[in-house]
Image (spheres, grey):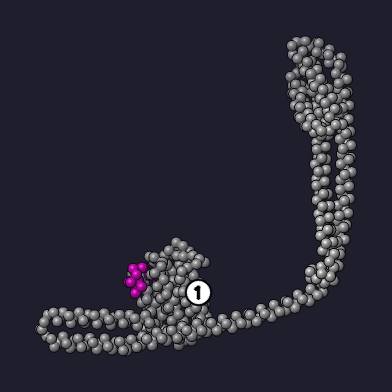
């Protein structure tokens, strides 16, 4: 409902609503605190009544204990007597402050105080006389009913105090009824205001519902459009990633071929020329022969470097020997270069050529990261198939990292993930500080027998540890 428009059409509505809200607040709060006060007073009244009754009962118990002790001379009767004295003191400790400001009840409490003290003094005197050996005198005093008037006066004052408390309770109940009536009237007024608000709401609900339905349809249409666009962009990005990876590998292949053909030919030619010069020098200057030997060694190192670069750009072992042998060679070379022990458990799997290259690159990138950051002592590489899925695990016992934490460079993992997802697979990284890292790749198994075929001289399915 457009509240602002309603206020503009009826300026007094806002003022009326504010006045009603303030009035209901005052009525509710006033009734609440009044009811709370009366409940507290009623509780205090009930406690006062209980203490008055306990006081009268304690005086009777004290007198009974005194008489029993005097008549039987048994010390057991003094225990109820002492308990009664304590109960009397507790009652006065409550009643004195309770009636301090009550002009009608306080004189009665003072008089009751005096009578009880006098009665207790009488009881104490008779007990003292009995204890000193004047038992007959003490017994005569008890039988003379000298304290009957005091007991009657105590009972009368107790009844009067109870009557005052009953009157206070009746007055409190009347006030509670009045408070309930005020609350009833307030609830009735609030109900009327609610009905008015409901009427205004129902008058506008139809328009609101139409607006909400229109908004929902617009939002749903926009959501559907965005979902289609996101799906289309995702497909485009996946295709772009696959294209870029293919272009990158093609460029690597072209560069490796050029290095192999041109640089290899130049280095080989230079080595042959050096060999011819050496044969013609014969027994010439030893220094020249030494320089020529150094030149030949440099050419050999250059040829070996070129081969390593070519192998990094385009792994010939993958094309010639298959995935299992290529991963075994990769693990052996990594162990030799880094000094990390590598356990490779590799089984033949069925993958397309591009998927095999993805697995090779992922393992290569994982080992590069281990060498740079992990500080690991052991690495486990596993290649296996289960059902129609191929699983690749690279596990190390290095320092690990927080997977959800912010890292300065995570492009290696991002690149691996894009490579795997472009082939329809999934990559999972599990790690924690001090607990090593696990990189798990899942790829769909290829149904193309030609692409999945491995060379006959491929490496064994389970390779031993590489040092």
Q: Quadrant of residue 205?
A: bottom right
- Point out residue 61 in the picture as x, y percentages from the top left corner: 80, 25
Identity of the residue drawn at 34% across and 81% down: 309
> Left or right: 151 with respect to 301?
right
Identity of the residue drawn at 45% across and 74% down: 412
Residue 389 visible, this angle: no
Residue 211 visible, this angle: yes
Up the image or down, 306 lies above or below 162; here it is: below
Query: Residue 414 in magenta?
Result: no
- Point out residue 142 in the picture as x, y percentages from the top left corner: 83, 16
The one of 309 and 136 positioned closer to us in this rendering: 309
Query: Residue 335 in magenta?
Result: yes
The one of 167 and 13 positioned closer to us in this rendering: 13
Identity of the residue drawn at 15% across and 87% down: 279
- Point out residue 2 in the picture as x, y percentages from the top left corner: 79, 70
Q: In which quarter of the image is the N terminus?
A: bottom right
> Left or right: 32 with respect to 269?
right
Q: In which quarter of the image is residue 56?
A: top right
Up the image or down, 406 lies above or below 390; here it is: above
Residues drawn in magenta:
332-346
Q: Residues within 10 Å of mark 1 (few under 14, many from 20)?
A: many
> Left or right: 420 with respect to 46?
left
Label 1, on which residue? 427
* Secondary structure at numbered mark 1: strand
- Point out residue 178 in the picture as x, y percentages from the top left corner: 89, 47
């Amino acid at each position: 409902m457009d509240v602002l428009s309603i206020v503009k059409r009826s300026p007094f509505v806002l003022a009326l609503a504010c006045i009603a809200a303030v009035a209901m607040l005052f009525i509710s709060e006033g009734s609440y605190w009044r009811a709370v006060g009366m409940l507290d007073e009623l509780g205090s009244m009930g406690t006062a009544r209980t203490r008055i009754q306990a006081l009268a009962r304690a005086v009777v118990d004290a007198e009974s204990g005194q008489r029993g002790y005097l008549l039987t001379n048994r010390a057991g009767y003094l225990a109820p007597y002492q308990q009664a004295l304590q109960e009397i003191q507790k009652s006065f400790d409550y009643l004195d402050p309770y009636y301090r400001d009550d002009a009608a009840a306080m004189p009665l409490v003072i008089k009751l105080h005096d009578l009880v003290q006098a009665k207790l003094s009488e009881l104490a005197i008779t007990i003292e006389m009995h204890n000193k050996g004047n038992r007959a005198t003490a017994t005569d005093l008890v039988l003379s009913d000298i304290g009957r008037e005091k007991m009657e006066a105590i009972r009368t004052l107790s009844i009067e105090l109870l009557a005052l408390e009953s009157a206070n309770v009746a007055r409190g109940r009347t006030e509670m009824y009045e408070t309930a009536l005020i609350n009833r009237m307030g609830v009735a007024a609030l109900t009327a205001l609610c009905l008015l608000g409901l009427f205004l709401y129902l008058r506008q609900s139809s328009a609101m519902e139409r607006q909400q339905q229109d908004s929902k349809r617009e939002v749903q249409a926009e959501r559907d459009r965005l979902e289609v666009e996101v799906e289309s962009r995702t497909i485009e990005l996946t295709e772009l990633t696959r294209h870029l990876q293919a272009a990158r590998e093609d460029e690597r292949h072209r560069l490796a071929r050029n290095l192999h053909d041109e640089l290899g030919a130049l280095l080989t030619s230079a080595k042959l020329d050096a060999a011819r010069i050496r044969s013609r020098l014969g027994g010439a200057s030893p220094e020249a022969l030494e320089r020529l030997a150094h030149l030949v060694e440099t050419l050999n190192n250059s040829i070996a470097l070129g081969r390593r670069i070519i192998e990094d750009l385009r792994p010939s072992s993958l094309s010639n020997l298959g995935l299992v042998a290529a991963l075994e060679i990769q693990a052996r070379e990594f162990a030799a270069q880094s000094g990390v022990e590598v356990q490779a458990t590799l089984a033949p799997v069925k993958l397309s050529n591009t998927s095999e290259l993805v697995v090779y690159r992922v393992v290569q990138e994982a080992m590069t990261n281990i060498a740079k950051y992990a500080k690991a002592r052991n690495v486990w590489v596993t290649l296996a198939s289960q059902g129609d899925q191929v699983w690749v695990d690279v596990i190390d016992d290095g320092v690990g990292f927080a997977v959800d934490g912010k890292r300065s460079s995570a492009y290696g993992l991002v690149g691996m993930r894009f490579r795997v997802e472009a082939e329809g697979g999934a990559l999972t990284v599990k790690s924690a500080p001090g607990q090593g890292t696990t990189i798990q790749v899942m790829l769909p198994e290829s149904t193309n027998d030609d692409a999945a075929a491995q060379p006959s001289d491929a490496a064994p399915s389970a390779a031993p540890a590489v040092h």
